[in-house]
Amino acid sequence: MKKITSALAALGLGLALSASVQATSNDEAVVERIKAVGSVCIEGDDSCGGAAAPAAAAGGAARTPEEVYNTKCAACHATGAAGAPKYGTPDWADRGSKGMDTLLSNAINGIGGMPPRGLCMDCSDDDLKGAIQHMLDGSK
Ligand code: HEC
């Protein structure tokens, strides 16, 4: 009986040992995985490899008026779709005579075939204003 007990104890110890070895290598694997995800990159650091760009595109960060126009307004205003005043044509000279305040409030609220905010729901009023100015400037 005593023999069996110590054999079992040895077996138990063996299991415990192998379990702890297992745990150790798992820990290392976990650390490796965490390192990969949590590796820090400072903005402007080359190692960031453009990771900052998607964050800017997701909103919040400033966009240039040209970017707003290209991504949000050009769909209609580059082609004149649905009667939209077309970029680079005298269409905009007529509109410009209304003054920026009127153009901006019509862009915010929508007018005729122009949907509210030109469908850019994450555009700030300043984004819209910049894009309008861009279209006015580009159509002189
Ligand atoms: C789905 C098509 C569409 C998109 C996208 C669109 N527009 Fe328009 N927009 C129009 C149409 C159509 C008109 C002409 C409306 C009218 O006068 O009947 C117009 C007119 C305007 C006008 C003139 C309003 C006035 O008072 O005469 C402004 C300013 C304007 N759009 C700004 C923008 C801006 C800024 C964007 C992008 C953020 C944008 N639009 C995106 C279709 C669009």
Image (cartoon, helix red, strand yellow):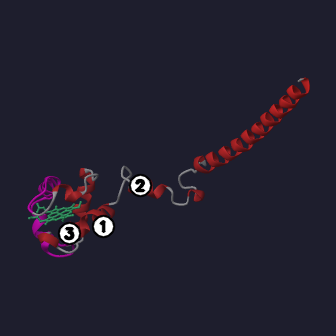
Q: Residue at x 26, y 58 (%)?
A: 130
Residue ID for mark 2: 56
Kindly tell me whether residue 137 is visible in this rendering.
no
| Quadrant position of residue 4 | top right
User: Is 76 within the magenta?
Assistant: no
Q: For mark 2, does the 10 Å Cα neighbourhood hold few (<14), some (14 to 19), or many (20 or more) residues?
A: few
Q: In 3D space, how far apart are the residues under numbered discs 3 and 1 (Cα atoms)? A: 10 Å
Q: Which residues are magenta?
A: 86-112
Q: Which residue is mark 1?
A: 70
Q: Image check: 112 left or right of 54?
A: left
Q: Residue furthest front?
A: 1
Viewer-nearest residue: 65 or 13: 13
Label 2: which secondary element: helix
The tag on residue 90 is: none
Q: Which residue matches tag 3?
A: 76
Viewer-proximal residue, 123 or 92? 123
**Front residue of 18 and 70:** 18
Q: Quadrant of ligand 1?
A: bottom left
Task: Kindly tell me whether mark 3's CB lies below 8 Å from ligand 1.
Answer: yes
| Mark 1 residue crowding within 10 angstroms, few (<14) / some (14–19) / many (20+) | some
